[in-house]
Amino acid sequence: MDTSPLALDVDGQNSLADDRLRGAKAIANFMGVDERRVYRLAECRIYPIGKEGAWLLASKAALRARHRQLTQG
């Protein structure tokens, strides 16, 4: 079974919606930092945080992978 973050099951397991974080507050809560830090991390492209209009977007799996890269290197 494909367990990649983009694998979609009909019952909602492993759906893209389950992996997505929308808004600085949601990203900050997930990362354990404040919202101001999220904006800075996005601006400097330290973490994979994108924009959809005025909203910041991020993938939980992508944030975890990038955190692993930064902490193991």
Image: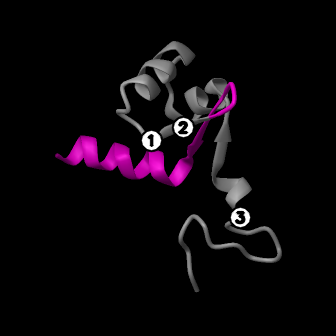
Q: Secondary structure at mark 2?
A: strand
Q: Is residue 67 magenta?
A: yes
**Residue at horizontal 68 percent and vertical 59 percent from the top:** 16
User: Which residue is at the far top?
Assistant: 36
Above or below, comparing residue 10 to residue 19 in the picture = below
Q: Is residue 72 magenta?
A: yes
Left or right: residue 7 versus residue 38 is right
Which label is found at residue 48? 1
Pick whichever of labels 3 and 2 is earlier in the sequence: 3
Its colouring scheme is one colour
Tags 1 and 2 touching, CB below 8 Å: yes
Badge 2 local density, few (<14 within 10 Å), some, or many (20+)?
some
Left or right: residue 9 versus residue 61 is right
Name the image quarter holding residue 40: top left
The CA span between labels 1 and 2 is: 7 Å
Residue 20 picture location, percent across and down:
65, 48
Which label is found at residue 13? none
**Residue at horizontal 32 percent and vertical 49 percent from the top:** 68
Above or below, comparing residue 23 to residue 9 in the picture = above
Above or below, comparing residue 71 to residue 37 in the picture = below
Above or below, comparing residue 20 to residue 33 in the picture = below
Q: Secondary structure at mark 3?
A: loop
- Name the residue that disc number 3 marks: 15
What kind of residue is marked 1? Answer: Pro
Q: Which residues are magenta?
A: 52-73
The CA span between labels 3 and 2 is: 19 Å
Pick whichever of labels 3 and 1 is earlier in the sequence: 3
**Residue at horizontal 56 percent and vertical 81 percent from the top:** 2
Quadrant containing the N terminus is bottom right
What kind of residue is marked 3? Answer: Ser
